[in-house]
Amino acid sequence: MIRRIALAFVLCALVTCSAFGDDKDKFFDSNGVKIHYVVEGQGEPVVLIHGFTASIQMQWGLPGILSKLSKDYQVVAYDNRGHGRSGKPHDPSMYGVEMVNDVTRLMDHLNIKKAHVVGYSMGGFITDLLVATHPDRLITATLGGAGWMRPDDSRMSFMTELADSLDAGKGIGPLINQLTPAGRPKPTEEQIDSFNQMLSLTNDPKALAACVRGMGKLNVTEAQLKANKVPVLALIGELDPLKAGVDELKTVMPDLKVVVIEDTDHMTAFRDPKFIGGLEDFLEAHSKLKPAAAAADGAK
């Protein structure tokens, strides 16, 4: 797993600066923080929110998700604050709920009233809170590699250790260990050091530490979830340790649609064809505008 992650970061570092032309790269000011985004395709809007330490390219570009969705939808993908080509503040108070506000501010900036929102990992937890606090802005919500982060969730106690490790310049070893599937050997120190070197090519450790410290503000309550009326899909790897949170979410959100991607973990599920396949099926089922590809097939 470590080798696959490191390779992804190397590829991301090589293409991040040149993947999009000047006509696609855009920026806007979100309460004092510069946010980088791209818009591709036409149709109903789909907003993509990447995970921790990732970027537009790493999460959505390299696996082909951005290009596939843009054939039928207007896809808006952005770099979270603290990531990619967006601003990287070092103050924890500028993360958490502010990351949720970045989504609605970007939608306002683009005059988008409602959108399908798709988040992976940290982006999934941002989407959770969007469902709870801004349901009027959502057509659907998709949680990739993420479930329910409850208030005072004991499983998130390692986050302090992770933030301290980043602040001390020791990287994200605690997170790598946390995401290693049960039954698999923990990565060696050498493997973690190798990955952290790759991480430093595209990230600011102090900004990542601040992001982690603010992430506890993304939790949602049981009452908020039970009140949900937005169609929600969870796409989760069979071996992903975060699947437990999806299972718990299903108990309080009975209408939640869950797609378990066999033989994948947190770092491989979003690159599996079943991920984009399940996402496309869900979006089409809840789209008011029939996707162009589906309409073309129906006309044959």
Image (cartoon, helix red, strand yellow):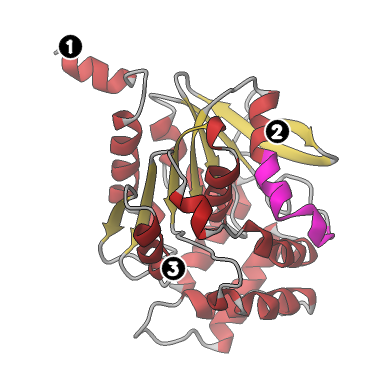
Between 217 and 51, the one nearer to me in the picture: 217
Which element is circle 2 on?
Answer: helix
Number of on-image labels: 3
Q: Which residue is mark 1?
A: 299
Name the outermost residue toward the top.
299
Q: Is residue 99 magenta?
A: yes
Look at the image and give the residue range highlighted in magenta.
90-102
Q: Residues at badges 1 and 3 in contact (C-beta under 8 Å)? A: no
Up/down of 232 relative to 217, above or below: above
User: Where in the figure is residue 19, as x and y percent of width and height?
Assistant: 59, 38
At 44% from the left and 33% from the top, the residue drawn is 67
- Looking at the rendered image, the disc whose residue lies closer to the viewer, 1 or 3, is 3
Disc number for residue 53? none
At 74% from the left and 54% from the top, the residue drawn is 95
Q: Which residue is mark 3?
A: 242
- Looking at the rendered image, the disc whose residue lies closer to the viewer, 1 or 2, is 2
Residue 248 appears in the picture as rendered: yes
Name the chief secondary structure element in magenta.
Answer: helix
- Give the residue type that dot 1 points to: Ala
* Classed neighbour count for the residue bearing mark 3: other residues with Cα under 10 Å, few (<14), some (14–19), many (≥20): many
Which element is circle 1 on?
Answer: helix
Res 157 → quadrant: bottom right
- Give the residue type that dot 2 points to: Arg
Distance between mark 1 and mark 3 Cα atoms: 41 Å
Up/down of 156 relative to 278, above or below: below
Distance between mark 1 and mark 2 Cα atoms: 38 Å
Q: Which residue is mark 2?
A: 105
